[in-house]
Image: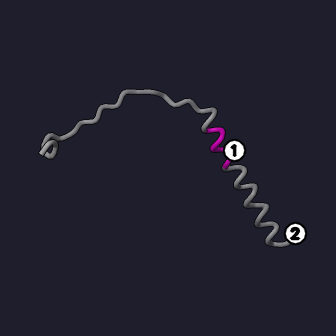
Amino acid sequence: MPTLTRLILVLIILGGLGYGAVYSLANLVEPREREITVRIKKDGFGR
């Protein structure tokens, strides 16, 4: 197998694995909802 063909084949396989990982994370993992509290200093607020 020539070097260029081998390189293209490896890149296609890695791209497919990456696409599969992103697809599975987007469809199979459910995010958890939680409350977030952010404190803001009054010093620079509303000059």
Is 6 placed above or below 47 here?
A: below
Question: What crowding class fits label 2: few (fewer than 14 Cα within 10 Å), some (14-19), or many (20 or more)?
Answer: few
Question: What crowding class fits label 1: few (fewer than 14 Cα within 10 Å), some (14-19), or many (20 or more)?
Answer: few
Element type where label 1 sits in the image:
helix
The numbered mark at residue 1 is 2
Residue 19 in percent (x, y) is at 67, 48
Residue 43 in percent (x, y) is at 12, 44
Residue 10 in percent (x, y) is at 76, 61
Is 37 placed above or below 6 here?
A: above
Residue 14 in percent (x, y) is at 71, 55
Within the magenta stretch, is there residue 21? yes
The numbered mark at residue 35 is none
- Tell me if 44 is positioned left or right of 8 in this view: left
Which of label 2 and label 1 is nearer to you? 1
- The residue lying furthest to the right in this view is 1
- Tell me if 18 is positioned left or right of 3 in this view: left
Query: Which residue is pictured at 60% across the width and 37% down the height?
Result: 26
Residue labelled with disc 1: 20
- The residue lying furthest to the front in this view is 46
Query: Which residue is pictured at 15% across the width and 46% down the height?
Result: 44
Q: Give the extent of the magenta segment.
A: 19-25
Which corner quadrant of the image does residue 13 belong to?
bottom right
Q: Which amino acid does the dot numbered 2 rest on? A: Met
Mark earlier in primary sequence (2, 1): 2
Query: Which residue is pictured at 56% across the width and 30% down the height?
Result: 30
Magenta stretch: dominant SS?
helix
Query: Which residue is pictured at 65% across the width and 38% down the height?
Result: 24
Closest to the observer, 32 or 44 = 44
